[in-house]
Amino acid sequence: MKWFHVIGLSSLVAFGLTVAAEAPAPQLAGVQTVYILPMGGGMDQFLASRLTAMHVVQVAADPQTADAIFTDHLGESFERRLEDLYPKPALPKVVDEDQDKDKEKDKEKPASSSVANAAALADGGKATAPVSTFGHGKGTFFLVDRRTRNVLWSTYEKPQGSRPEQLKHTADIVAKQFKTARTGK
């Protein structure tokens, strides 16, 4: 009799986990149109094709019409790309007398010959770190809300190679996973 209870309880727990795993993600409900940033190996083209063919979401050619962005990387280069696509409105400049005095003091300091300072001066006072593209296209996909810039969904599905049929297969898996996350089916 004890085995019956253990098996029954295990079945209910397993069923409950299955149902919970198939529940639609509420943060994806508002995503109707996506823009896909260029990805390693041309994966963006395959992903666009599969998302469209499976009627998961509409893929936009114009980033201004998209609700969210698909990308294969995050970080400074992604943030700069978002800033290029969706610049934040300029805030009115407030004059701060203390800040003006600090600028005058900085002008009086001798210039350093370090590469970082040279880069900062050349970039209008903003130093930026070099960004490597070596890690792009390694199998992680992110869906980022264009307004909040929060990651809404992500998955890892590494392509088994770089041949078109392998990329198409990977894109198909990612599109199915995204569809399941959106609809629960």
Image (cartoon, rainbow, N blue to C red):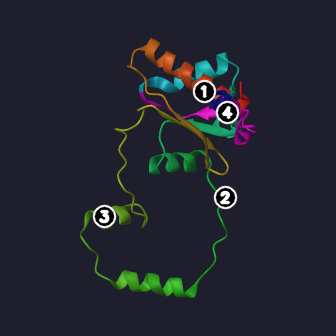
What are the residue bounds of the magenta stretch?
12-40
The residue under label 2 is which amino acid type?
Pro
What residue sits right under mark 4 in the picture?
9
The residue under label 3 is which amino acid type?
Ala
Q: Position of residue 10 (x, y in %)?
A: 63, 31
Instruction: Tell me if I can see residue 95 in this picture.
Output: yes
Crowding at dot 4, Cα within 10 Å, few <14 / some 14-19 / many 20+, comes out as: few
Crowding at dot 1, Cα within 10 Å, few <14 / some 14-19 / many 20+, comes out as: some
What residue sits right under mark 2 in the picture?
89
Answer with mark 2 or mark 4, whichever residue precedes in sequence. Answer: 4
Quadrant of the image containing the C terminus = top right
Q: Position of residue 59 (x, y in %)?
A: 66, 27
Answer with mark 3 or mark 2, whichever residue precedes in sequence. Answer: 2
What residue sits right under mark 3 in the picture?
116
Residue closest to the eye, 68 or 56: 56
Q: Is 24 within the magenta?
A: yes
Q: How many marks?
A: 4
Crowding at dot 3, Cα within 10 Å, few <14 / some 14-19 / many 20+, comes out as: some
What residue sits right under mark 1 in the picture?
177
The extreme top residue here reads: 165
